[in-house]
Amino acid sequence: MASGTRGVAAATISLAVLLLIFCFSPSTAAAAGVPSIDATRTRHLPLPRGLLRGPESVAFDAKGQGPYSGVSDGRVLKWNGDKLGWSTYTYNPDYSSEACTASLLRPETATEGHCGRPLGLRFHLKSGYLYIADAYKGLMRVAPGGGEATVLVTEVDGVPLRFTNGVDIDQVTGEVYFTDSSRNYNRSQHEMVTRTGDSTGRLLRYDPRTGKAVVLQADITYPNGLAISADRTHLVISSTGPCKLLRYWIKGSKAGTMELFADLPGYPDNVRPDKKGGYWVALHREKAELPFGIDSHLLALRIDADGKITEEMRGPKGVRPTEVVERKGGRLFMGSVELHYVSVVTRK
Ligand SMILES: *[C@@H]1O[C@H](CO)[C@@H](O)[C@H](O)[C@H]1NC(C)=O
């Protein structure tokens, strides 16, 4: 295992050097010239003690409470402010603290298949339902107040969900859009999805009125996070491996078709509306990123309604955000699948 890891690391470095040599052009610095937010120093909302980590998504309810975030033991936690910290909000039917609390002998990688791994989170504001895209359990929902979540979808068109990942909701109709990143690989094999160029991901829609889910688009390369546009005519979907954003039309003359929306200088994860018609897109790392040199990389990009980059956020390479959500007063909440906290960045 260890030598295999070293081999991969060496290969990654030489690939990175090659990329630097061949790709170092103004386009790699595609975000240059736009306003930049410095996220070197951030406020932390630390997870409870122990081996808990990875608050991947950051959602807020209709009252503005939260953030809510899914963590490595399979639960979704709620932040109740500095004094009270995090509390358990919801969990899947297979969760138990005995079986799912990680220890040094039992890391979360050994339990996440059974205990679940919530990735995307989104509230339907009118009903107060929280929808959860859990990598292993599928699409779930919990009623206002939390508690045990109900599993809604585990397969679509006879094909099991293998790697449920992103979710967003049409707040008017209540329809739920979500992604299954691959038919071949689960979350623990996510690097294979990128490395093999796997293109078996699906964009799906769940209708809460009928309880049925349908495939909108199959054969997508690593669909990850997604967001419905402010005018509800289309979805913007991350395609992680190819470093792109895709646009899927729900309404209008192009309904049912998908097209390129933006080329990105890094690997995108979740996409969230910026409330100005555009989106915040969290990036894991830059396309041509070296593991040495200046300790700074792109954390996130703000993209306008036409796919143009209008703002960037930079910070240390050890931070690889999965979601960025902007709240009142220019406060940006940042989730991560690796860290032990949610970060709060304040725009100066
Ligand atoms: C992911 O899929 C692989 C291959 O099918 C399997 O061996 C592994 O147990 C799965 N991982 C989890 C956590 O379910």
Image (cartoon, helix red, strand yellow):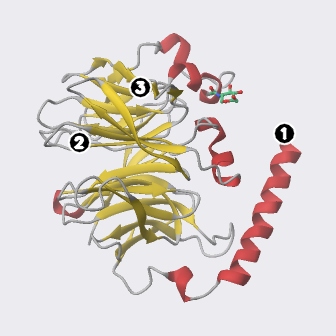
Quadrant (top left/top right/bottom left/bottom right) for the C terminus: bottom left
Q: Quick one: label 1 or label 2, which is nearer the N terminus?
A: 1
Residue found 29% across the figure and 71% down from its top: 304
Viewer-closest of 46 and 317: 317
Q: Is residue 284 left or right of residue 121?
A: right
Label 2 neighbourhood size at 10 Å, few (<14), some (14-19), many (20+)?
A: many
Q: Is residue 198 left or right of residue 328?
A: right
* Residue 242 locus on image (x, y percent): 57, 62
Query: Hey, which residue is sitting farthest front in the picture?
Result: 253
Report which residue position mark 3 lands on. Answer: 75
* Residue 322 locus on image (x, y percent): 45, 51
Q: CA distance from mark 2 to mark 3?
A: 16 Å
Residue found 60% across the figure and 22% down from its top: 111
Secondary structure type for disc 1? loop
Q: Amino acid at mark 3?
A: Arg
Establish if 145 lies above or below 94.
below
Residue found 30% across the figure and 62% down from its top: 279
* Residue 288 locus on image (x, y percent): 63, 72
Residue 124 occupies quadrant: top left
Report which residue position mark 2 lands on. Answer: 60
Which disc, if any, is residue 1? 1
